[in-house]
Amino acid sequence: MPSPGRNINSQMEFTAKQIADLLQGTIEGNPGTTVNKLAKIEEGTEGSLSFLANPKYTEFIYTSGASLIIVSNDFVAEKPVAATLIRVADPYACFAKLLEMYNQVVKDKKGIETPSFIADTAKIGTEPYIGAFAYIGKNAKLGNNVKVYPNCYIGDNVVIGDNTTLFAGAKIYSDCVIGASCTLHAGVIIGADGFGFAPASGTYNKVAQIGNVIIEDHVEIGAGTTIDRATLGSTIIRKGVKLDNLIQIAHNVEIGSNTVIAAQTGIAGSTKIGKDCMIGGQVGIVGHITIADNTKIAAQSGIGSAVTEPGQIIQGSPAFGISDYRRSYVVFRKLPDLEKKISELEKALAEIRQTIS
């Protein structure tokens, strides 16, 4: 069986000193210890780098086979530790920094693979990566260091900013705009028609969707998420928004900056969501309403009316204040007992009335 852990690069090794210098940490052990892969502390093997941030995992530091472990400055070993240690102020943040570096190494692709199609009028920036079977349409403009993985579709007149990555199978329909430093994961669809149909004598006529989608900088969109183009104007995803997998965002929706939304949420047309909101999974939001800034919506909630007061935490379907919801739920669970008690009280009251009469 292969050893646990993920190779940093088959040709790359780093010493404890190099990593300590990068993280501004102090070494306890051999500065020449080398590592070439990352691993969880309980799965560490020779040549791997791990970290200890959660006290629940302290026991594994004494048995881990990892060669190098990042620990906090205040960690006190109760037993001998075989691994070389690097002491830092925040082990989790430092390990996250190393993960990001690893990610950049792994995804540092360059060049244009064949077969792929790039229209003569498309403009491609410097140091691109365009994977096999990708399609880039007329007058499309891609910034510098844009990565387009295999089987992606980029329609006519699309604009994509610097350092943006489209993973395999992403589809960007015509006239849409993607900002800089965005990540669109596999199967994302940007700019498909909104769900617009007009009733006509027992059937439905399609309403043409001639707007577009604008995605601002530093947005990440999870696999399989769809964002529909506007009927008129633009569907807008503001700067710093993070969308999970399998989310549906309808036509003319606007999502405020730095809002995060978990998987399987659906947002109906023309709804405006404020900035810095947190929306849980499987939330349903009706169309043509406004959600105030800093709103937090618990998973599986149904939002049927506007949320006008910023900073609320709401839950339920239909959703209301989370404290009231929890008190109500306690009562709801007791409804069978309450019904029984009411029946008993009604029976006792009837007997009293009969006695009095």
Image (cartoon, rainbow, N blue to C red):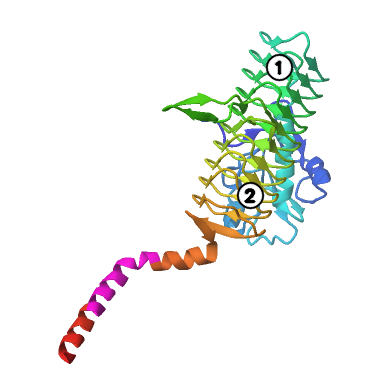
Q: Residue 102: where, in percent of width, then height?
A: 71, 34
Dot 2 amino acid type: Thr
Quarter of the image for residue 77 reads bottom right
Distance from the alpha carbon under mark 2 to that under mark 1? 32 Å
Magenta span: helix, strand or loop, mainly? helix
Q: Position of residue 342 (x, y in %)?
A: 28, 75
Q: Badge 2 is on which residue?
A: 290
Mark 1: give few (<14), some (14-19) or many (20+) Cα within 10 Å.
many
Give the magenta part as a residue range: 332-346
Please name the residue shown 62% across and 60% down the image.
Answer: 312
The residue positioned 83% from the left and 49% from the top of the image is 24
Q: What's the amino acid at mark 1?
A: Asp
User: Which quadrant would residue 267 be assigned to in this image?
Assistant: top right
Label 1 sits on a secondary structure element that is loop
Q: Work out whether 53 lies above or below 147.
A: below
Q: Nearer the viewer, mark 2 or mark 1?
A: 2
